[in-house]
Image (cartoon, rainbow, N blue to C red):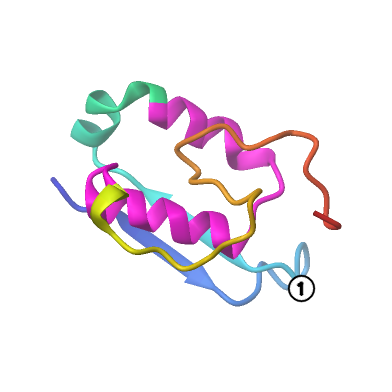
Amino acid sequence: PNTVFIVHSDHGHRRIRPYQSYMSYIFPAAFMERYPERMAHFQANQRKLVSYFDHHLTLVDLVTGFDAGQWVLPKLPPESSSLFKPVKATRHCGA
């Protein structure tokens, strides 16, 4: 009941999205109840352009319990964001 299940593939469905990677998260009910605002952002970000850097920061949030202040993180592009925070809808492939 306290496990986040993540599925990742280097490509999507061959007939629909053959060149886009696939990533899926499954959260336990207790997690969704404890963090409703973060889950609302996560769900809103489902249809937005996201990158591996965003997934990296999402995993950091999960591992650190949303407190990465003590961790030394690699330098990431400034537009990178955890999926538990709002991702700009104006994001495009150039930035």
Comparing 40 with 87, the one in front is 87
Does the magenta segment cover residue 66? Answer: yes
In this picture, residue 63 sits left or right of residue 26? left
Question: Residue 21: x, y in percent?
Answer: 64, 68
Q: Residue at x 69, y 35 (%)?
A: 88
Comparing 60 with 49, the one in front is 60
Residue 70 sits above or below residue 32 on the image = below
In this picture, residue 38 sits left or right of residue 45? left
Q: Residue at x 48, y 46 (%)?
A: 82
Q: Farthest residue toward the bottom?
A: 10
Q: Quadrant of residue 71?
A: bottom left
For label 1, the residue is: 19
Span colored in magenta: 38-67
Q: Main secondary structure of the magenta part?
A: helix
Label 1 SS:
loop
Q: Quadrant of residue 87?
A: top right
Residue type pointed to by label 1: Tyr
Does the magenta segment cover residue 71? Answer: no
In this picture, residue 50 sits left or right of residue 72? right
Residue 42 sits above or below residue 40 on the image = below
Comparing 13 with 86, the one in front is 86
The quadrant of the image that shows the N terminus is top left
